[in-house]
Image (tube, rainbow, N blue to C red):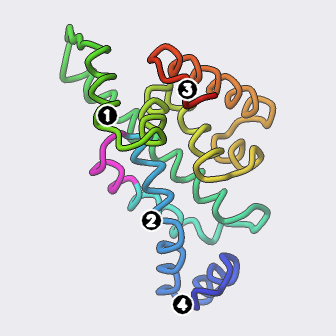
Amino acid sequence: MNKLNDIEIIDSVKRGNYSDYSLLINRYKDRAFSLLKRLLKNEMDAEEALQDSFLKAYNSLAAFRNDSQFSTWFYKIVYNTGLSVIASKKRKVEQQMSSIDEQFDLVSYDAEIYSGAENGREYILKMVDKLPIRGALVVILFYMDGLSLNEISQIMGLSLVNTKVLLHRSRNALKDLLIKHNYQEEML
């Protein structure tokens, strides 16, 4: 049954074989969780958002029109769910706190990240996390998940041109971050 493609699984679920949806869950849970973890920077929030995403996708399965890949459609749901969680948390923080003067030492934070990183790739991923959310996501979706620019533009709700520009700017910002933090030898 694992040899079925996404469309065959969806058709099976629509015909009443609801347990086949677990095949889609198993196929996409790891990549979607990774995306949410990077977006939300909190494992528990990512788990909850992942469950919400699968539930939203399941409830909207009848609306899936097969004019794009299921993965693209599903990652758009995941992305939007993550953004909703961020917006909700931001509203809660603004309501609970009137002001906080919170400063931390960026240099010691970078040293902590670098010393805690097992290898260069892990350090670069931690530096990607320092990019603005949309920039980090476009880099992760393109380089880590191997999605095309068309798929990324559909997921993020951007035009193809804007997606290309965002990827270009995010790459440059990442390069600048790495150079600023004396890690340019990995970039060359």
Whichever of callouts 2 and 3 sits on the residue coming sooner in the sequence is 2
Q: Which residues are magenta?
A: 41-49
Q: Is residue 184 above or below residue 100?
A: below
Q: Is residue 183 above or below residue 156?
A: above
Residue beneath disc 2: 55
Residue ID at (58%, 86%): 2
Distance CA(mark 2)–CA(mark 3): 44 Å
- x, y percentage for residue 11? 67, 83
Count residues near mark 2 (Cα–Cα under 10 Å), then give few for <14, some for 14-19, many for 20+.
Answer: few
CA–CA distance between discs 4 and 1? 37 Å
Q: Position of residue 139 (x, y in %)?
A: 60, 38
Q: Foreground mark, 3 or 4? A: 3
**Left or right: residue 160 compared with residue 108:** right
* Amino acid type at mark 4: Asn
Which residue is label 1 attached to?
Answer: 89
Element type where label 4 sits in the image: loop
Residue at x 19%, y 18% (from the top left corner)? 97
